[in-house]
Amino acid sequence: MYLTFLPRLMLNYFCHGPNKNPLHMTATTSSTIFHFLSFEATREQAKALYRLEGFLDPECGEDVFVLRGAAGTGKTSLVKAVVDFLEGQQIGCYLTAPTGRAAKVLGFKTHSLAHTVHHTIYKVIPTDDERIVMERKVNTQDAYSVFVIDEASMISDNNRADGNFQTPGSLLFDLLVYVKQGNPANKIIFIGDRYQLAPINEAESVALSLNHFMKKYNLTGQQAELTEVKRQEGRSPVLALAHDIRRKSDAGNALGKLNVNRLYNFTAGVTRYVNLYDSNGPDNVVMIGSANKNVNTFNKLVRDRLGLSGTLAIGDQVIVNENWIDSQNLIVKGETGLVREIEGCVEKRANLEFITAKIEFQDPDHQPLVITTKVLLDTLKSEKGEIPGEMLRNLKADRMAKNFDYRANQHPANDPYMGAMRLRYGHGLTGYKAQGGEWNHVLLHPWFHENDYRYAYTAITRARESVTSWEQSGWWQK
């Protein structure tokens, strides 16, 4: 589907002035965006900021600004200046990211409230089956506004089924429609790192391509790229390693064995994780692996070390494996929670096992949200968290026979077993599930596909302080 957003305002001099050279301009008043920058901008950053300030002018008729930059180049610092500048200009600014974890990071770094894209643009529509159907909200805010989308490399423009989760169009399409519905002059800034993993089964991150917006959606805009790692951050071993991966990727050179701190074996990696783990600070450490079976093995050993017995226990760190909904809340796939209580014993329905638990998540405003729900334990025991379709059909038949409310309206929220939460353990994650998050320390499983630059880069750049791996015979052997 294609969009044409007309009419357009004439581009003003600030957008395309023929003689404007931002490098010859100086920030002399508090009204400039540079007033809100907490450090001296590099030449590259200054050029991007001048272009952003022109783009943000309501009289500038451009639609999108794509700001690309590798880790350590100052993207987030520039975004904070943009947010503060817009606040000073009394222009509405909406901060969003594809996942709750990424939104939390964005909000922390900008000292502002950030929500997920799904929370911003969708509402849940009840159905008479197991689907979770999302409908685009009506954007009634007609005042000129700017939407900032962080971690845009994760935004997909493909319409594809995602389990029981359905949206009107692709996430990118629905976002564009929602933003422009409020006011055709509204603008979107897409921020991201083109070296990170693209959406699953997609070759590139189209939300970081101005050309994609121009060709498919007839939108106008600008694109800037930051490549220079700031000097004070250049001493970071994490950023040095990320730069080395980028350099090899650009040159087409073999990735080889990553130059990270290395423990003597897998067990030592588990020990390091347990020593660093803090249930009250779940963003201190994570293990990232490329294969589900390696992640599962790690999670099992960590649970053993932490003394967590049974399939689910108080203190388990978990991640939602399928979007979950009740009458009031939507917990999106990928959200991380902590099991606070276990109620009762294991129940069996249609050869599937369930237990009731209280799990603490964060609500859209990043406040504690405790959900009491039944948990389908079989997903925790499955290698990929998948349940055979026949077993789910048997469960549905059982609930249709025994639950009148569910028989009348087959929405998952109408039956505690059909609406049971499906979880995975959250100490070790795959690269895709870790994307958008940050941890102080990352343990990197040593096996991944040879020369998978994007996976290695994405995993490495989840770390704020350190990356550690361990020795493994047959580096490229699974």
Image: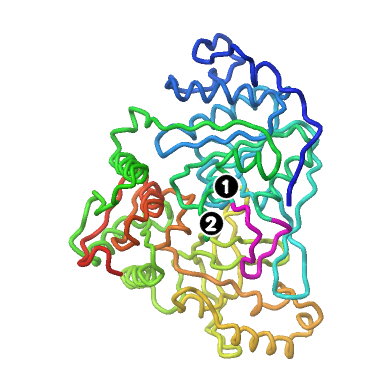
- Majority SS type along the magenta span: loop
Residue 16: quadrant of the picture: top right
Residue 101 seen in the figure: yes
Q: Residue at x 54, y 84 (%)?
A: 353
Say above or below: 239 vs 436. Answer: above
Query: Few, some or many C-alpha atoms within 10 Å of disc 1 (few <14, some 14-19, many ≥20)?
Result: many
Viewer-closest of 347 and 48: 48
For disc 2, the marked residue is 202
Q: Is residue 140 left or right of residue 26?
A: right
Say above or below: 408 vs 300. Answer: below
SS at circle 1: helix
**Dot label at residue 415:** none
Viewer-closest of 424 and 67: 67
Quarter of the figure with the C terminus: bottom left
Amino acid at dot 1: Val
For residue 158: magenta?
yes
Residue 448: quadrant of the picture: bottom left
Q: Residue at x 62, y 40 (%)?
A: 95
For disc 1, the marked residue is 206
Amino acid at dot 2: Glu
For residue 177: magenta?
no
Query: Few, some or many C-alpha atoms within 10 Å of disc 2 (few <14, some 14-19, many ≥20)?
Result: few
Q: Is residue 26 left or right of residue 364?
A: left
**What segment carries the magenta color?**
156-169
> x%, y% of residue 143?
78, 32
Q: CA distance from mark 2 to mark 1?
A: 9 Å
Badge 2 vs badge 1, beta-carbon distance below 8 Å: yes
SS at circle 2: loop
Q: Residue furthest left?
A: 264
Say above or below: 83 vs 267. Answer: above
> x%, y% of residue 19?
59, 11
> x%, y% of residue 213?
64, 41
